Amino acid sequence: MSTSTTLLALLEPGPAHGYTLKRNFDQWFGRRRPLAFGQVYSTLARLTRDGLADQIEVEAGHGPDRRLYRITPDGAAAVDDWVFTPQPAEVFATSTLYARVTVALLSGRDVTDVLARQREAHLRRMRELQAARRQATGAVLLAVTYELAHLDADLRWIEESGTRLDTVRRHLDRTGGGHA
């Protein structure tokens, strides 16, 4: 996900301060990893420098100045481009899970244990998400169902990989690709 473009898109409904943008980002996109304030303000400075956002007001107060930002027409065009450009399908061609399983195979570690542990972690997370889905609405429902679908796909891959381990090990032994 492009944090800068997402923050820029959060300016489309109307001008906002950095604090408001962070709060909205965290509400919609930062469920597992909230955005740091420093990242918000450095991103806003970059967006302003690049002509995608304007700083339209500075309010002096007892603390740091409060700066109000708005999106520019070039910024709105950048958001359109980002939203409507399809994500490359290859983005899912590799993953940390795949890499860990492959390293376990190549190094002679217990791949069955790796798959079993990951299966349990996925099932635990799916139970949490299924409980959350009962109360979820709007964008939160979209986020929860998106994560559930990806976990389900991973679980299918874990199951299929478990049935192929002997075949893969034999292939690695023949080609010298793994430790025995």
Image: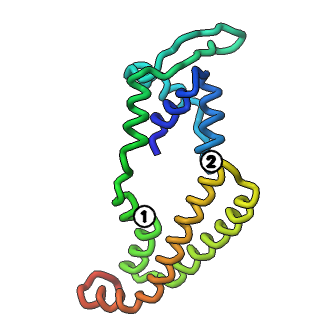
Relative to residue 158, is residue 34 depicted above or below? above
Work out which residue is located at the far top of the displayed protein and give it.
60
Helix, strand or loop status at disc 1? loop
Give the mark toward the camera: 2 or 1: 2
Q: Position of residue 16 (x, y in %)?
A: 60, 22
Residue at 55% in and 71% down = 152
Residue 12 image label: none
Relative to residue 36, is residue 57 depicted above or below? above
- Residue 129 in which image quadrant: bottom right
Helix, strand or loop status at disc 2? helix
Please indicate whether residue 91 sits to the left or right of residue 144 in the image.
left
Residue at 76% in and 56% down = 135
Q: Position of residue 157 (x, y in %)?
A: 47, 76
Q: Which residue has dot 2 on it?
A: 139
State the residue in front, 157 or 12. 12
- Residue 107 in which image quadrant: bottom left
